[in-house]
Structure formats: structure tokens, C-alpha cells
Amino acid sequence: MRWHGVSRCSVWQVCYHEGTNVPAGVGAAAAGDLLCLIARTREGNEPDHESQQRQIQIMTANSDRPFGEALRVLMQAGGLTYRSLAQATRELDGKGMTHAHINMLANGRDKPSMRAMALIAEACGVAPDYFAEYRLAAAMRELDPGEVGLEQALANLNARLGKRRGSAATGRRAPPRPARSRPTR
């Protein structure tokens, strides 16, 4: 993938040069794209440390914002226009998306499909799970008996509930409150 003419560079070269740590959980390819994005200059000005950290946070954490808002944040962080993002999607799968459709998605005038979210995410250098709607659609799909069958849907539900119960069980609990006697009447 290319960001405005900057090809993917070595993660370690950029980290060493910039003194930046690659965030945990970021794959080498995504980190390379991310650090190239951070390292590039805009109109001859080096990005400051705060904007670098903001870009790392935007592109490595999952968004809880509506799709259009999350997409606009990614586009702004990457310096992408609707046309450049459309071109990047075309380079990925040959078909891609139009800039007009991306504009409609970004402004909430159309609902994104799983394919559109995955394609845009890849073009922006993030995982599809970055988008809240993608995570919701994936969960709904794996819990839909029509998609995976009743037995598998129930197994998926039990696995999700088990994870939730397990994470709650390992979380810190408040100390038990001492029992108080009730006043008698």
C-alpha cells in the first residue's frame, strides 16, 4: 500500500529514526504503513510528537464511533481524499469503490456492507474490526442460525457468554460489605 507516494518502509528503521515504539498488537505491515504515515511530511513540515501519538492512537484502537465519523477520522489522519481512497480500493481488488459511494458512506447517506468496510479498512491500513459496525455485523452473522446453523449459533452464543463471564470473573471485585443488622421496630 502507498500513502501519497510513500511506500511501506521498514518498521525498525522508522522506529529507530523516530524513537517511536510500535504499539502492541500491530502487525508489521500495518505498523510499517502507520509509521510511514507518521514519518511523512506535509507541505514540508515534520509532524510534531503530539500529532504522531494521536495518529498512532487513531489507527491502532478500535473505534466506537458511527461508521461515517470513524471513516472521516481515518481519512483525515491519513491525509486521504474520497478520490484517493477510491483509487486505493481499486488497487486492492480491481473493482474497488467509487469516490461518490465513499462520500455517501462517510456522510451517513448509505449503510456500509461488510465488503465495503473490509475494503476501506484495508485501504486505510487498519483491521476491519476498527469499525464498530463491522464488529456488530460479524457478531450478528455468527449468531444467525440461517447463516451458520442452529447448533453452531448456540455454540457461538455460549462461547461469547463464557468469555463475558470469564472476563467478569477475572476482573477485580469490590470487597464484600460487612453485614449490617436491621433495626427492629
Image: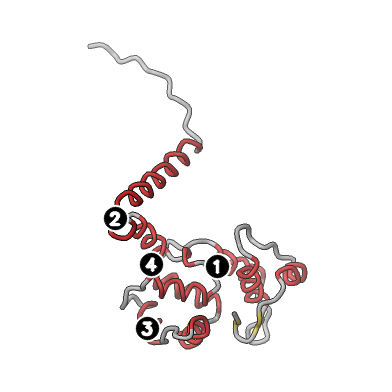
Mark 3 residue type: His
Residue that badge 2 annotates: 145
Q: Which element type, helix, strand or loop, lies under badge 1?
A: helix
Quarter of the figure with residue 146: bottom left
Q: Residue furthest left?
A: 185
Q: Residue at x 37, y 47 (%)?
A: 155
Name the front one of labels 3 and 4.
Answer: 3
71 in relation to 149, above or below: below
Of the numbered discs 3 and 4, the one sitting upstream in the chain is 4
Category of crowding for the residue at label 4, using alpha-carbon neighbours closer than 10 angstroms: few (below 14), some (14–19), many (at least 20): few
Describe residue 5's horizontal placement relative to residue 182 as left or right. Answer: right
Q: Position of residue 179 (x, y in %)?
A: 39, 18
Of the numbered discs 1 and 3, the one sitting upstream in the chain is 1
Work out how far the residue at label 4 is from the one at label 2, CA to CA, in angstroms: 27 Å
Residue that badge 3 annotates: 101
Mark 2 residue type: Pro
Name the front one of labels 4 and 2.
Answer: 2
Work out how far the residue at label 3 is from the one at label 2, CA to CA, in angstroms: 31 Å
Question: Nearest the camera: 161 or 172?
Answer: 161
Instruction: In the rendered structure, find residue 125 and report the number of the disc placed on it.
Output: none
Work out how far the residue at label 1 is from the one at label 3, CA to CA, in angstroms: 22 Å
Instruction: In the rendered structure, find residue 59 and report the number of the disc placed on it.
Output: 1
Q: Quadrant of the N terminus?
A: bottom right
Q: Position of residue 136 (x, y in %)?
A: 37, 60
Residue that badge 4 annotates: 66
Mark 1 residue type: Met
Question: Nearest the camera: 28 or 131?
Answer: 28
Q: Are marks 4 and 2 in contact (CB under 8 Å)?
A: no
Question: Nearest the camera: 118 or 42?
Answer: 118
Mark 4 residue type: Pro
Of the numbered discs 1 and 2, the one sitting upstream in the chain is 1
